Amino acid sequence: MSKAGNDVVIIELDRPRVLRFGHKALKKLTAFTGTSVEEVGTQNDFDLEELETIFFYGLERDARESGETLTLEMMEDILDYAPSLDYLLEKMQEALRISFSGTSQGNGLTPAATQPAQNRAQRRGIGKTR
């Protein structure tokens, strides 16, 4: 759940952490995924390494503000504290929804989230597309 009147999501992992996708995190995330900012988090076929990277960018600020040096290699162990994969996905979607709240269309979804998700080959520009 996000803090009242704030743009963060608290996720319970090895400790309560703030999951936030601000400008810097979104910029890094779009560069990593090769997608537009509107498409971030809308695909349904994450592999676990992609999930670790998405959370890494979303948790970087919390770690820095807590005096922790977070590395991508640490993410596997940190995410192991989550009760389930569904919990991680729900928190990720909640944090992304909050980051886009200024551009939502009244239903809490970004424009791309209302479109069918692309598979991995389509996102990377290979294979057949409709």
Image (spheres, helix red, strand yellow):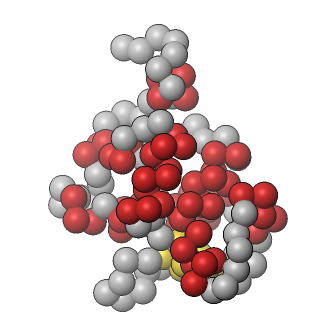
Q: Residue furthest right?
A: 77
Left or right of 127, for residue 74: right
The residue shown at (67%, 41%) is 47
In this view, the residue in front, 114 or 77, is: 77
Left or right of 80, for residue 24: left
Q: Position of residue 123 (x, y in %)?
A: 47, 29
* Image height of 116 relative to 81, above or below: above
Q: Position of residue 81 (x, y in %)?
A: 76, 71
In this view, the residue in front, 60 or 47, is: 60
State which quarter of the image contains the C terminus.
top left
Left or right of 82, for residue 6: left
Q: Position of residue 116 (x, y in %)?
A: 37, 33
Judge whether residue 34 can be spotted in this image.
yes
In this view, the residue in front, 13 or 35, is: 35
* Image height of 65 relative to 77, above or below: below
The residue shown at (51%, 26%) is 124
The residue shown at (63%, 77%) is 63
Left or right of 35, for residue 115: left
Q: Residue furthest left?
A: 106
The residue shown at (36%, 68%) is 98
In this view, the residue in front, 99 or 94, is: 99
